Amino acid sequence: MVNLTRIYTRTGDKGQTRLVDNSVADKTDPRVCAYGDVDEANAIIGIATATGDLPPELTEALGTISNELFDLGSDLGNPVVAEPAWEPLRIEQPSIDRLEAWCDRFGADLPDLTSFILPGGTVAGSHLHLARTVVRRAERSAWAAAAEYGLGPQEEGRPGGINPLAITYLNRLSDLLFIAARVANVSAGDVLWIPGKDREPTDARAKRQRERITRSTTLAAGDDAGAGD
C-alpha cells in the first residue's frame, strides 16, 4: 500500500535511491534512468490528454496507459528474483496484446504514408510525438539496464535483471503513440518530411519522390479545407 505522508525525505541527497525491493541504487543506475524516462513520458501523455482535443476513445486508452506506466515503473524498479516473497507487480503479455490491438484499431482508417512524419501538427499531436521519443529513450535505457543486469533472476554477485516484457511494452507503446499522434493530427494533416526540401532534386527518382510527397500534402490540405463545408 502507498502511504505518502511527506514529499521530501532527504534520503536521496547523496545521489542514491531505493528500488522497489528496498535495495540501494545510484540515481545514475540504468534501471533508475529507465523508470525515470517512463515517468517523463507519462507526464507528456498527461499534457496531450489535457488539451481535450483527442477523440474520446483515444483519451480513454491513454488514461489506461498512464495508469499502467506506473505499473511499468514499478516493474523496472524491482529486480527479478526466482522466488519472490510476494507477487511482484509486473507487465504481462495481455497488456502488450492490448497495445497491439489499439495500434490496429486506431491505425485502421489512417491514410498510407508517403514519407516520414515531422513532429508537428496540433498541440496534442505534437506532445504525443514527444512522448513517443521519450518512450524510445526509456526503451534504450531499459536495454542498457538489461545489458548490465540481464533478463533473468538474480545470480551470485549480481542483482536481479529486467523483465523482458517490460521492454517489449515500451517498444509497442512507442508504435501506438506514433499512431495516436497521427490520429490527433487528422484535422491538420500529417506534417511530412521532404528530403532536401530547400534543394532541387538531383535525379529522376528523387524528383518523383518529391512530387509524391507534395501531392499527398496537398490532398491532405484539401481534405481539411473541405471538412467544414
Image (spheres, helix red, strand yellow):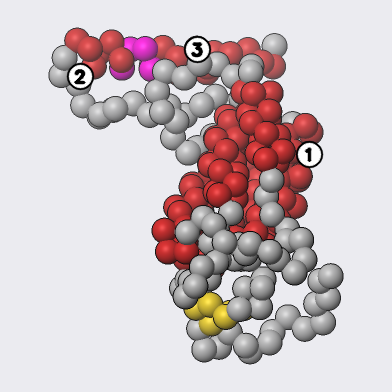
Residue assigned mark 3: 219
> Which span is picked out in magenta?
210-214
Residue 25 picture location, percent across and down: 53, 77
| For marks 3 and 2 on the same chain, the one whose residue lies earlier in the sequence | 2
Q: Is residue 223 above or below residue 199?
A: above
Residue 44 visible here: no
Residue assigned mark 1: 60
| For marks 3 and 1 on the same chain, the one whose residue lies earlier in the sequence | 1
**Which one is in front, 17 or 225?**
17
Name the amino acid, label 1: Glu
Q: Is residue 2 above or below residue 96?
A: below
> At numbered mark 3, what does the secondary structure look like: helix, strand or loop?
helix
Residue at figure coordinates x 28%, y 10% from the top left:
208
Residue at figure coordinates x 47%, y 75% from the top left:
157
Name the amino acid, label 3: Leu
> At numbered mark 2, what does the secondary structure look like: helix, strand or loop?
loop
Q: How many marks?
A: 3
Residue at figure coordinates x 20%, y 21% from the top left:
200
> At numbered mark 1, what does the secondary structure look like: helix, strand or loop?
helix
Label number found at residue 149: none
Helix, strand or loop for the magenta stretch, by majority: helix
**Taking 54 as reference, is 125 left or right?**
left
**Which one is in front, 42 or 53?**
42
Name the amino acid, label 2: Pro
Residue at figure coordinates x 50%, y 50% from the top left:
139
Residue assigned mark 2: 201
